[in-house]
């Protein structure tokens, strides 16, 4: 495994549409392993292949329950709405409120090409939508309702931590 360089928003590769993965080989396995390692090292909860310079339809997410790898993911169904603050490893030090579906069903393949289906809500649904957007050249800043400051985020974190202690 190896850390990969995360591309920053000025990089034109982030605006291109990724290609369907057709070979489920060692190169793909290495890419997925490297993406997970890179995501964890950068303290992210998701990473898409274009963010490390590879125009392939592959993502990894881990909102706290363990890593999920998805190859050729597609949102099959979505419902509801949630608005929350997002950031992105490719857009450092920028945060904004983004509306996403509350619940999604995503179909894709695992690293071996086997079909998988994920039913997700809340943060996992948000993370999947965010990373799948990357595969189509869409960044969260394209969908921001309102940008937020670091101070707002800190206030929110301290309020949530206070609620957790009660």
Image (spheres, grey):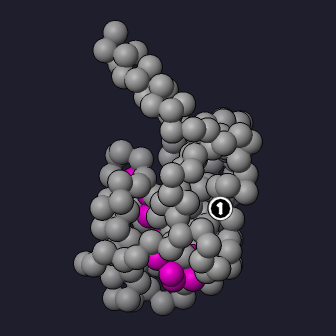
Q: Which residue is mark 1?
A: 139
The magenta stretch is 52-62
Q: Secondary structure at mark 1?
A: loop
x and y percentages locating residue 43 in the rendered image: 35, 54
59 part of magenta stretch: yes
> What's the residue at 67%, 55% (across, down)?
141
Q: Is residue 102 above or below residue 141?
A: above
The N terminus appears in which quarter of the rendering?
A: bottom left
| Residue nearest the observer in this picture, 150 or 68 | 150
Q: From this viewpoint, is residue 107 visible? A: no
> What's the residue at 50%, 32% (across, down)?
151
| Residue nearest the observer in this picture, 40 or 65 | 40
Tally of numbered tags: 1
> What's the residue at 48%, 25% (across, down)?
155
Q: From this viewpoint, is residue 157 visible? A: yes
x and y percentages locating residue 125 in the rendered image: 56, 47
> Within the image, what quadrant is residue 96 found in?
top right
């Amino acid at each position: 495994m190896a850390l990969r360089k995360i591309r920053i928003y000025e990089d034109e590769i982030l605006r291109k549409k990724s290609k369907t993965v057709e070979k489920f080989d060692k190169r793909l396995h290495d890419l997925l392993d490297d993406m997970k390692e890179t995501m964890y090292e950068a303290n992210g909860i998701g990473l898409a292949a274009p963010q490390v310079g590879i125009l392939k339809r592959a993502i990894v997410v881990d909102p706290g329950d363990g890593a999920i790898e998805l190859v050729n993911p597609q949102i099959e169904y979505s419902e509801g709405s949630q608005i929350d603050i997002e950031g992105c490893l490719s857009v450092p030090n920028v945060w904004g409120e983004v509306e996403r579906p509350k619940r999604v069903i995503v179909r894709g393949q695992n690293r071996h090409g086997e079909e998988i289906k994920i039913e997700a809500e809340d943060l996992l649904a948000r993370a999947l939508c965010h990373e799948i957007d990357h595969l189509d050249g869409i960044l969260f800043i394209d969908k921001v309702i309102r940008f937020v400051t670091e101070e707002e985020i800190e206030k929110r974190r301290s309020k949530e931590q206070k609620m957790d202690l009660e």
